[in-house]
Image: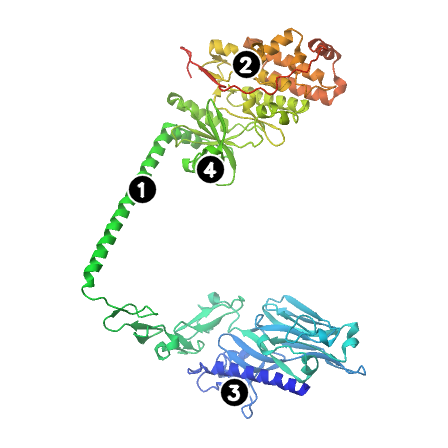
Amino acid sequence: MHSSIFGMIIFTFTLWSSQKLVLSSSHNDFPIAKPNCNDSCGGISIPFPFGTTPQCYISPEFRLTCNHTSSDPPKLFTGETNFEITDISLDGQITLLNSIAYECFNSNGIRSSNFSEEMRLGSYLTVNHTANKFTMVGCSAIAVVSGATIANQVVATAGVTQCSSEVDVTEGTCNGVGCFQVEIPQNVSDYIVTIQRLPNYTNTWNFSNCTYAFVVDDSAFKFSKDNLTNLSRVKSLPVVADWVVRNETCHKTISNTATYACVSVNSTCYNPTSGYGYRCRCKDGFLGNPYLFQGCIDIDECSNQTLHDCNKKASCTNTIGNYTCTCPENYEGDGRGEDGCKEKPPKDMKITYVLIGVIIGVICLLLGIILLYLDLKRRSHNKMKRKFFLQNGGHLLQEKLATREASPDMVTIFTSSELEKATNSFHNSMIIGRGGFGTVYKGVLADARTVAIKRSIRVDPTQIEQFINEVVVLSQINHRNVVRLLGCCLEKDVPLLVYEFISNGTLSSHLHNEAKAHALDWNTRLKIAAETAGVLSYLHSSASTPIIHRDVKSDNILLDHTLTVKVSDFGASKLVPIDLDQLTTVVLGTLGYLDPEYMLTNQLTEKSDVYSFGVVLLELVTGRKALSFNRPVEEKSLSNYFLYVLKQDLLVKIIDEKIVGLGNMEQISTVCKLAKECLNVKGEDRPSMKEVAMELEGLILREKHSWATNVDDVEEMKSLIPNDHDGTSGVGYDSISMDHIVLPINDGGR
């Protein structure tokens, strides 16, 4: 039975070789070797650049030896070994026969072996890593294939086979039980195969007493169980190697006519996928040997139906490198494919075609009119955007930006299409806030930044220059507690301002929500007060041009995810010239926060922000809203009610019981006194925001160093907050429906 299986292996290999030979010779209707040179040996075709004598090969690396007195195949000497050749392809492949590494033991423990199989291919050949497989047959052994690439890199691949019994081995499957296969690394020019038995090999010697390892053309070997014992009779197996005619690329060698190998007129050079060396091939429509002068011969596609796609009705005419198809009389078309030739319509069909042409023309005319209308509409829209851009001071803003050095902090001029895309055309679902000065939308820019876009309700055409100045100045405010102005859009009827987006809501939404208010303990509220005061102090004192916020309130104090303050909404802000202490302007602000002196005199000063901040301090201490019509008349205004209960020594009635603790009464007392100072009717009697900020920062620092607490302050707190605490609170009232006021004054201006 073993002999029959061995015979099948030999038959399979012989059949494979004969098929390759037939495929090679089927295209040999053209010269493949130089004149007066042998083009075959032992039934194997020898195409140039290969040859058996110096005038017949391109360089010594392609020299073959041939015994013309026998039927032996030619041999290729690669520097150390003569390999028998079974096939040479002009596509860049050559098939060599190489030996098998094996190790065998008989029942007496006597070993016979050829431990290694070695192949050295030289500088123009590499092992084909897709056609070949590193294969190991046997049990309880390790085999390693190691070698070097053309770039002198060392590579290695190993495999292990295990068998506990012959039943475990699967016919035709190399899964590591009796047989193992793996691909060869790319660009390997030299390799060696070695075998090492595992200690338990004696357990399987009765059905697998040999281990074999070899590199083989995958199409020429199929595993069989009988291979465990009969492969020792096979002396060699085919290996497919890739060859290149030169070890340079086409780009480097094409200009050197002395060494350029693609000499045929109709040939071209190409680099293999491995990126090593180059080969030649005939152009499309030609067949032959591109390494020979006049070696690429025109293919007569018309001589074989499989070589052209002319319609059955069409006639095929061969041309140099191509062919043409011609339809017969009364047929029209290019003659190619199934629909290449169609009968011409009768003459009376021409009228129908004319009508169809007219209809198509009318349709095209209508489409042209529609496209023209859309283009005019687009031009009109762009013209309108340009008009609004100039009307809103866009040219002035560009001039101011051009005079400044470019920096990351510079204001960005957004287009209307950018902001429409970011807000889904300003859809109502994107609205996140409304106020007396405009509507705020949430938007996502093209660079994935989330922003808040404020759309103003009104704009004063006479104040465009001042508005542009304010945009430039506000965009340069670089303070960690200020919502940054990123830019603006001036292509709408009213300007759009783009701010960074703060996701955690306003201070008002936290203070006046029962669930959120519990998260605002006293230390957090004190930090919020200090950070807000620091921002206002910076605007009043440290900015290049002093800025009055003009609308300080808890709705304009945003909190980020760490409850850090971000002061927002500078829509009502005013720049204050350095040489002026006050401005005469239309009264703008929010009821409950408005400075009474400002309401009476129209004189806007920094102290107007101080008064509004005092109301914010009261909101932090009491948890109540600045103004609520749902409370009794005497409690509607938080500031008036605070001054009243303070005068009556009943302050404890309005302190938010959520912040009252054993150790913070002194701080609450100090903040209440500071709020009282901020709420003085006369602005000159109020402290500056710088003084307020310093007082709050000092209060936080004194808390960190509690050993510095002043005993006198404790006593004063006791006088402010008596012991008749009844726990009443104003938390939970609804906000007013109108939160802004505009009072026109005859002599006021803006």
Indicate the quadrant containing the C terminus: top left, top right, bottom left or bottom right.
top left
Q: Label 3 vs label 4: CA separation?
A: 75 Å
Instruction: Tell me whether the residue at label 3 lies in contact with that at label 4, contact meaning CB atoms closer than 8 angstroms.
Output: no
Residue 513 percent coordinates (x, y): 60, 25
Q: Nearer the viewer, residue 134 or 477?
A: 134
Q: Nearer the viewer, residue 295 or 57?
A: 295
- Indicate the position of residue 271 as horizontal and vertical percent values: 49, 67
Colour convention = rainbow
Q: Quadrant of residue 518?
A: top right
Q: Amino acid at mark 4?
A: Ala
Where is mark 1, residue-wise? 374
* Gap in angstroms between the C-alphas marked 2 and 4: 39 Å
Question: What SS does tag 3 mark?
Answer: loop
Q: Residues within 10 Å of mark 2 (few under 14, many from 20)?
A: many
Residue type, mark 2 in image = Lys
Residue toward you, 3 or 387: 3
- Residue 265 visible in the displayed image: no
How far apart in space, not on screen, are marks 2 and 1 (Cα)? Answer: 55 Å
Q: Secondary structure at mark 4?
A: helix
Element type where label 1 sits in the image: helix
The residue wearing badge 4 is 422
Which mark is on residue 607? 2
Q: Earlier in the sequence, mark 4 or mark 1?
A: 1
Q: Is residue 556 above or below residue 89?
A: above
Q: Earlier in the sequence, mark 2 or mark 1?
A: 1
As helix, strand or loop, the secondary structure at mark 2 comes to helix
Marks 3,2: beta carbons within 8 A: no
Whichever of callouts 3 and 1 sits on the residue coming sooner in the sequence is 3
Q: Where 355 sits versus 68, above or below?
A: above
